[in-house]
Image (spheres, helix red, strand yellow):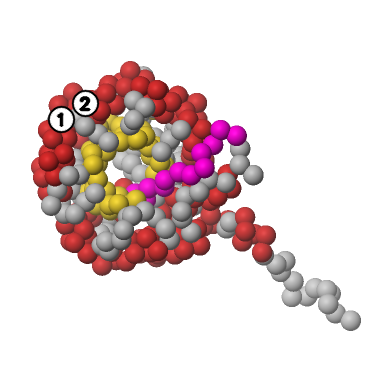
């Protein structure tokens, strides 16, 4: 039985191939990435952030972006996204068969300087140019608002700073924006308010949320933004990735596990189109390829259906069943 105020369905966007793999020191082979894409599609995933067009010296893990996009299966209804950190990256991206181009702008000044070596104003000044390029190339532009709610070494980010980036994204022609819980210390109330504000100010704009799970609040935050009317949620297989240059234990710095989000939506009666047992094949495979333990509760504890179908083990020396 679903709770009141929730949608009938929601889109789940897989970001593990980009945001997940950029945190793994040893690059995967192109063929391994393409095989993962096939597993995701077979499981019903229809939106995949597959590549980044950062400079290969900055992210050698993702240096084969063009090769990956040339090899991925083209299936009706499946959309591929790629991230461009700047205009030069966007130029590389436009000829690679993407459906959506993602540009990240931090709402927090210090994170913008550390991560992109740009002030927020400098990052925003390049958005219009990238927006024009995306429009000429027939790509949907999606703007990610990093540190939408909370920033390391600072705390809560004022709504006005988040709003500044959202307004610039809309002016640049973004078809959608997503509010990123970059730090993993976001709370349900502020995430609800952020999505509700964008919904109110820009009713025709698609709105997503990118979830991290440092504080364990990802499921509560997902529930809050679902109630606020979010269009999509983002996570990665096995919870891989996250901003590992932030302070803290790496084991809690990852993205929200997409399998946990799918399991949550199933439990709430919200359709995602994802077949969870099939999706777990991709999640298990990424653990094999990277050697990183899964951060997913579904991986470690199983699903509700699996536990219901379990049988009690009979101890070796038990008298049960003996004459």
Q: Which residue is mark 1?
A: 128
Vertical placement of 239 versus 248: above or below?
Answer: below
Q: Secondary structure at mark 2?
A: helix
Q: How many C-alpha atoms fall within 10 Å of the one at disc 2: few (<14), some, or many (≥20)?
A: few
**Can the viewer see residue 146?**
no
**Residue 250 lies within the magenta run:** no
**Residue 11 lies within the magenta run:** yes
Rendered location of residue 57, percent (x, y): 14, 50
At x 36%, y 53%, the residue is: 46
Q: How many C-alpha atoms fall within 10 Å of the one at disc 1: few (<14), some, or many (≥20)?
A: some
Measure the C-alpha gap from mark 2 to mark 1: 7 Å
- Quadrant position of the C terminus in the picture: bottom right
**Can the viewer see residue 302?**
yes
Rendered location of residue 156, percent (x, y): 40, 23
Q: Which mark is residue 140?
A: none
Q: Kindly report the secondary structure that dominates the magenta region of the rendered protein.
A: loop
Instruction: Please give the count of numbered marks on the rendered protein.
Output: 2
User: Which sits in the foreground, 114 or 195?
Assistant: 195
Q: Which residue is mark 2?
A: 171
Q: Is residue 50 left or right of residue 84?
A: right
Q: Which residues are magenta?
A: 4-15
Of the image marks 2 and 1, the number of the one nearer the N terminus:
1
Q: Secondary structure at mark 1?
A: helix
Q: Is residue 139 left or right of residue 107?
A: left
């Amino acid at each position: 039985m679903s709770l009141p105020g929730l949608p009938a369905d929601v889109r789940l966007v897989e970001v593990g191939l980009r945001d997940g793999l950029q945190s793994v020191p040893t690059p995967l082979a192109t063929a391994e990435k393409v095989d993962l894409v096939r597993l995701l599609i077979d499981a019903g995933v229809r939106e995949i952030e597959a590549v980044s067009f950062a400079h290969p010296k900055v992210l050698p893990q993702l240096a084969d972006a063009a090769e990956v996009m040339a090899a991925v299966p083209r299936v009706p209804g499946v959309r591929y996204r790629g991230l461009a950190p700047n205009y030069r990256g966007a130029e590389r991206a436009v000829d690679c068969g993407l459906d959506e181009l993602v540009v990240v702008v931090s709402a927090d000044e210090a994170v913008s300087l550390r991560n992109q070596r740009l002030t927020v104003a400098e990052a925003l000044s390049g958005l219009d140019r990238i927006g024009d390029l995306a429009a000429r190339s027939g790509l949907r532009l999606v703007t990610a608002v990093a540190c939408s709610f909370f920033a390391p070494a600072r705390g809560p980010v004022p709504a006005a700073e988040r709003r500044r980036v959202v307004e610039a994204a809309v002016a640049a022609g973004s078809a959608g924006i997503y509010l990123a819980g970059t730090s993993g210390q976001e709370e349900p109330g502020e995430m609800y308010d952020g999505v509700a504000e964008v919904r109110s100010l820009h009713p025709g704009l698609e709105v997503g949320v990118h979830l991290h799970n440092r504080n364990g609040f990802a499921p509560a935050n997902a529930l809050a933004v679902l109630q606020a009317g979010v269009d999509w949620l983002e996570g990665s297989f096995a919870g891989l990735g996250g901003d590992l240059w932030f302070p803290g234990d790496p084991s809690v710095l990852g993205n929200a596990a997409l399998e946990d989000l799918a399991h949550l939506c199933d439990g709430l009666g919200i359709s995602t189109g994802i077949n969870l047992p099939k999706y777990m094949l991709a999640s298990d495979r990424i653990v094999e390829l990277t050697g990183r333990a899964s951060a997913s509760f579904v991986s470690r504890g199983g699903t509700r259906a699996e536990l219901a179908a379990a049988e009690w083990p009979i101890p070796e020396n038990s008298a049960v069943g003996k004459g």
